[in-house]
Image: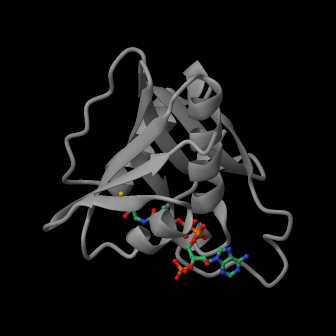
Amino acid sequence: MELAQQTQSQPEQAGAFQGGAVVRPAKKAEMEQVRQMIQILFPRARSKILPQDRFLVAERSGVLVGFCHYRLRRRHCYIAGLGVLAQYRNRGIGSRLLAEAVYRAEKSGALETRLKVRALNTATKLYLRMGFFEKRCGDVLLLVRKREN
Ligand SMILES: CC(C)(COP(=O)(O)OP(=O)(O)OC[C@H]1O[C@@H](n2cnc3c(N)ncnc32)[C@H](O)[C@@H]1OP(=O)(O)O)[C@@H](O)C(=O)NCCC(=O)NCCS
């Protein structure tokens, strides 16, 4: 399995991406590629990976194109990272990764899912659309989503 190169920035040919990506848990053997993806997408971030952390990946034609890093603690889920390589964005992959993480977390008993995002990050729109609301404002927003039932 290869990691798509961020530098290959040509847009996909029309229709080539139809059918979208498969979203599934990352395999152990893929974790090095996931780390590379984090490095590409968040070069300045120092996000820790804890032993119990979970990762979902989006795979498109054998290529890893996105990830969601989340952490379950008792009744809470924390989204530690969400990213899709630039040339695969705006196709619903980020939303699918997040929805799958929330679904799995809630199935495992999480009553609330939280994440932090810079106020100016356009990703905020995606989160609000998916039922997150602002709990704390400032340069960095704390967004929370409550389980519905
Ligand atoms: C944030 C991020 C993960 C979103 O990933 P994505 O795959 O582009 O997300 P989606 O495609 O689900 O949604 C993005 C936009 O595409 C639109 N979209 C979704 N499916 C679409 C489709 N089939 N056709 C056209 N547009 C579509 C969505 O409506 C959304 O638009 P809007 O936010 O302007 O309303 C991605 O931009 C990213 O990795 N950014 C850099 C890292 C980052 O900032 N991560 C968040 C840190 S907390």
Q: Residue 102 at what x, y percent from top left?
A: 57, 42
Quadrant of ligand 1 in image? bottom right
Tally the marks.
0
Question: In the figure, is residue 33 to the left or right of 71?
Answer: right
Q: Residue 50 at what x, y percent from top left?
A: 33, 20
- The C terminus lies in quadrant: top right
* Residue at the image point whose x is 42% and y is 69% from the top: 123
Q: Nearer the viewer, residue 4 or 119?
A: 119
Q: Nearer the viewer, residue 143 or 79?
A: 143
Q: Nearer the viewer, residue 22 or 32?
A: 22
* Residue at the image point whose x is 53% and y is 60% from the top: 131
Rendered view: 87 above or below 38:
below
Question: In the figure, is residue 79 to the left or right of 97?
Answer: left
Q: Residue furthest left?
A: 138
Q: Residue furthest bottom?
A: 14
Q: Nearer the viewer, residue 82 or 98?
A: 98
* Residue at the image point whose x is 57% and y is 55% from the top: 4
* Residue at the image point whose x is 65% and y is 28% from the top: 107
- The N terminus lies in quadrant: top right
Rendered view: 20 above or below 108:
below
Quarter of the view holding residue 91: bottom right
